[in-house]
Image: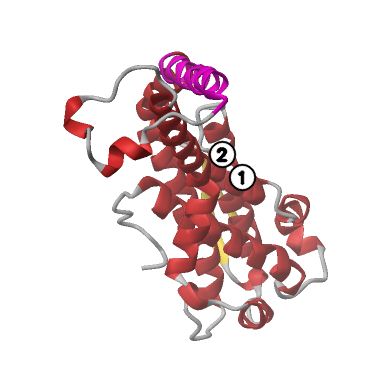
Amino acid sequence: MIRRKKINFFIERKISAFLLWSLTIIFLFIAVKTSNEEIIDILKDTSIEDLLQQFSRGNEFLKNISLGFLISLIFYLIVVYLPEKRKKDDIEPFINNKCESIIFSSYALINEILKKSDTSYKYQTLTKSQFEEVCKNVYPKAHIYKFAPSIDKITQGNLGSKIYNDWARIINEIEETVRLLPNIDSGILKRIFLLYNNYLRYMAKDLLVLDKLKNEDLSAWSEPLYNFYKETQELRDYYVLYSKNDFQNDPWK
């Protein structure tokens, strides 16, 4: 499983760079092979000398194509790649912090539901059927929490209100993160948008008015909540490979 995730990460994240540097080596070889310069003495009478002999025809055309590619690559590195890399390096600690916060906040949300279900299921290995059972065993109106929307104000609400507040906090962190576009890795951006666009965004507000609804458990919200859990896991798996950081609060460890 871990090996497959690494392969998928390489295909998604590294394949373009791999192809670019492969083409660079190929065109560099062609540029040398089609050159009119004499082969240096150290390579004469070796197998490499035969390899570097010019083609029978088309040498000028191939040399121009190769040199054009190599010059374009140098300009790309100087004008585009290095400045963008510098910007990404500068903001990477902030993005890493936000990713870890989003992942851990999502864990806190789902784990709170798990704790109230009186089941023995583990967060790290939750299946859809297990989570459906968990949601059937949770009666949100029976669990009361205190909230402090401001320093001088304390309110009360049930588990539904807590789930909504935790979800809203995650959405706020996502919105703060995407303000750093276009300096966010596309793989991370893709995965946090999955979380942002989870169907829970259309159903979460109902959790604030549970007292007015006939729902006694969380069954109606089990599917979007479980999708939220799986999307968080996908973000976590990608982030661990991308950042190579020691994720101390990793919920899947």
Instruction: Kindly identify which residue carries mark 2.
Output: 186
Q: Is residue 32 left or right of residue 150?
A: left
Residue located 43% across and 24% down the image: 31
Q: Quadrant of residue 174?
A: top right
Q: Quadrant of residue 86?
A: top left
User: Given the image, on which type of amino acid does mark 2 rest?
Assistant: Ser
Query: Residue 32 appears at what percent x and percent y?
Result: 38, 26
Give 213 or 40, whichever is nearer the viewer: 40
Confirm whether the magenta stretch covers residue 20.
no
Q: Residue furthest left?
A: 42
Above-or-below relation of 234 to 28? below
Give 109 or 5, whichever is nearer the viewer: 5
How many numbered marks does the figure carry?
2
Residue located 60% across and 78% down the image: 127
Q: Is residue 135 left or right of residue 120?
A: right
Residue located 67% across and 69% down the image: 141
How would you rate the neighbour count of disc 1 (Cα within 10 Å): few for under 14, some for 14-19, many for 20 or more?
few
Instruction: Kindly identify which residue carries mark 1.
Output: 190
Q: Report the span colored magenta.
A: 57-78
User: Given the image, on which type of amino acid does mark 1 rest?
Assistant: Lys
How would you rate the neighbour count of disc 2 (Cα within 10 Å): few for under 14, some for 14-19, many for 20 or more?
few
Q: Is residue 106 visible?
A: no
Q: Are marks 2 and 1 in contact (CB under 8 Å)?
A: yes
Above-or-below relation of 236 to 44? below
Give 20 or 81, whichever is nearer the viewer: 20
Image quadrant for the C terminus?
Answer: bottom left
